[in-house]
Image (tube, rainbow, N blue to C red):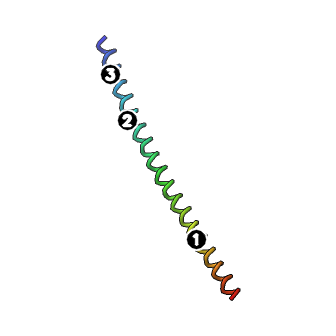
Amino acid sequence: MEAQLELTKQRNDQNREHKKEILNLTRQQRLDQQKMQEKYDDKIQHIIKQDQEFSQSQETKHDKERD
């Protein structure tokens, strides 16, 4: 009976540790995903800015051609 209780306690401890590991992994995955999303957003903003600058330069070019 005592051996069974000890075995159950060990299993519970292992399960608890395993759960902690899983939670840490999930937390890390969320952080990684957030970093990737921020990088992606930064790239999108950069592309939008480049596009706006290009559009403005084209407008300026057309304005000069008209003059």
**Camera-nearest label, 3 or 2:** 2
Task: Identify which amino acid the numbered label 3 is placed on.
Answer: Lys
Quarter in which the C terminus is drawn: bottom right
Q: Name the residue at 34% across, 15% down.
A: 4
Q: Name the residue under label 2.
A: 20
Q: Is mark 2 on a helix, strand or loop?
A: helix
Q: Measure how far apart labels 3 and 2 are at the Cα level.
A: 17 Å
Q: Which quadrant would residue 61 be assigned to in this image?
A: bottom right
Q: Which callout, 1 or 2, points to the residue nearer the camera?
A: 1
Q: Residue 9 carries which label?
A: 3
Task: Spot the residue most to the right.
Answer: 66
Q: Viewer-proximal residue, 55 or 41?
A: 55
- Cα separation, mark 1 vs mark 2, equals 45 Å
Q: Seen in the image, is 53 located left or right of residue 25? A: right
Type of amino acid at the residue the image marks with label 1? Gln
- Please tell me how crowded label 2 is: few (under 14), some (14-19), or many (20+) other residues with Cα within 10 Å: few
- For the residues marked 1 and 3, what is the alpha-carbon distance in whole angstroms? 61 Å
Residue 9 spot, x, y in % from top left: 32, 21
Q: Earlier in the sequence, mark 3 or mark 2?
A: 3
Residue named by callout 1: 50
* Position in image of residue 10 (x %, y %): 33, 24
Q: Is residue 53 above or below residue 2?
A: below
State the residue lying farthest toward the left: 2
